[in-house]
Structures are given as C-alpha cells and as structure tokens.
Amino acid sequence: MEGNRKIVNATRTQYADIGFKSKSEAMDYRTLVEAGFEPEYEQHTFVLWSGVRPTVPFYTKTKQELLSLDLRKLRDITYTPDFFFEYNGLKVVIEVKGFENDTFPIKFKMFRQSLEELEGQWMIFEIFNKKQLLEAIKVIKSYDSSRENEESDKHIT
C-alpha cells in the first residue's frame, strides 16, 4: 500500500471495508466501535464559508499571458471531520491529529464557530493518541449519565 501523500508520515490502512488515511484513524475507529459507538468516517462535510462569483475584476498571471482576467467562482471553504456519530442525542465529532497542515487551525476554528449556530448538543475532540481517545470515550459516556441525573433531579423536585 502506497504512503499517504497528503498527510506526513501516514500510511493508508484498510479496516472493516473502509480505506483510512492513516493507521491511527483505523485504530481509533476500531476503538470507537469496541466502545459501542457507530462512527462514520469522513461522511459529513460542513461548509464554513460559501464561495461567491466575484464581480470585481481580478487580473493575475497565467502560463500563456502576463495578465489575465479571472472571474471564476471562489470555491467554498469546507471541513470534513474524521469521525462523526450520535450518542444518546449528543452529536460527537472526533478529529484524529498527527501533524497539522497550515490550513487546519483556521478551518477548525471556523468549524467550532459554526457549531455555535447549529441545533442540538455537540461535543468535539481533537485526539493525538489512544490514551486521549479512551479519555474522550469516558467523557462522552459520562455526559450521558450526567444528563440522566439532571433529568432525574427535575422529576424529583
């Protein structure tokens, strides 16, 4: 299997009929499934900024010309998290990180901001190793039990 050119030091890995971009993502998927979750791998893409068709003339150099008018549509800025799943009404996003590229920090901040406007309860994790993933699993499962305790308290009073 050929190395993953987009991600530094990553090796594409096949597991459960899914082609993962790295061994770490495959291991995290397996761990999430073993913990009882149903993670979806790179299935959800969020539009962080909708592209526009510019009207202001923009001139730039091309291979053929010194200056050329470019009025092509500016593409959307999107973010696709590694894993997404729902657990007892909670929407969970897990981003598996190795080495960050130069655009990730900006897109991730934009993504976090966009979640403030979406419906439902969201939780995001940035995972660098298995120990962190196991801790995230505890947090997710404890969120469920803390919500149940809050609901019980409401019914008691």
Image: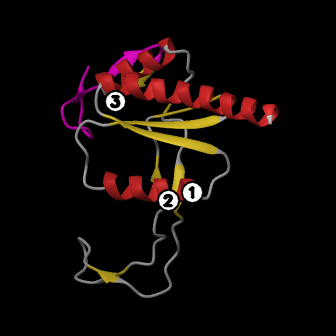
Can you identify the residue that label 3 sits on?
A: 21
Q: Residue at x 47, y 41 (%)?
A: 124
Query: What type is the residue that disc 2 sits on?
Result: Gln
Tell me the distance, in whole angstroms, between the alpha carbons under discs 2 and 1: 5 Å
Dot 3 or dot 2: first in sequence order is 3
- Which residue sits at x=52%, y=75%? 53
As measured in the structure, the alpha-carbon distance from the residue carrying label 1 to the one carrying label 3 is: 29 Å
Marks 2 and 1 close (CB-CB < 8 Å): yes
Q: Residue furthest front?
A: 157
In this rendering, which labeled residue sits more in front, label 3 or label 2? 2
| Residue 62 quadrant | bottom left
Question: Disc 1 or 3, which lies upstream in sequence?
Answer: 3
Please state the horizontal and vertical placement of residue 29, each as a whole percent of the image: 43, 21
Q: Is residue 40 magenta?
A: no
Mark 3 secondary-structure assignment: loop
Q: Is residue 93 above or below residue 63?
A: above
Amino acid at pointer 1: Glu
Label at residue 113: 2
Q: Which residue is mark 1?
A: 116
Which residues are drawn in magenta?
Answer: 1-17
- Which kind of residue does numbered mark 3 sit on? Lys
Could you tell me which secondary element the residue under label 1 belongs to?
Answer: loop
Position of 115 relative to 16 (above/below) = below
Q: Nearer the viewer, residue 56 or 9?
A: 9
Q: Position of residue 49 (x, y in %)?
A: 50, 64
The residue located at (29%, 33%) in the rendering is 128
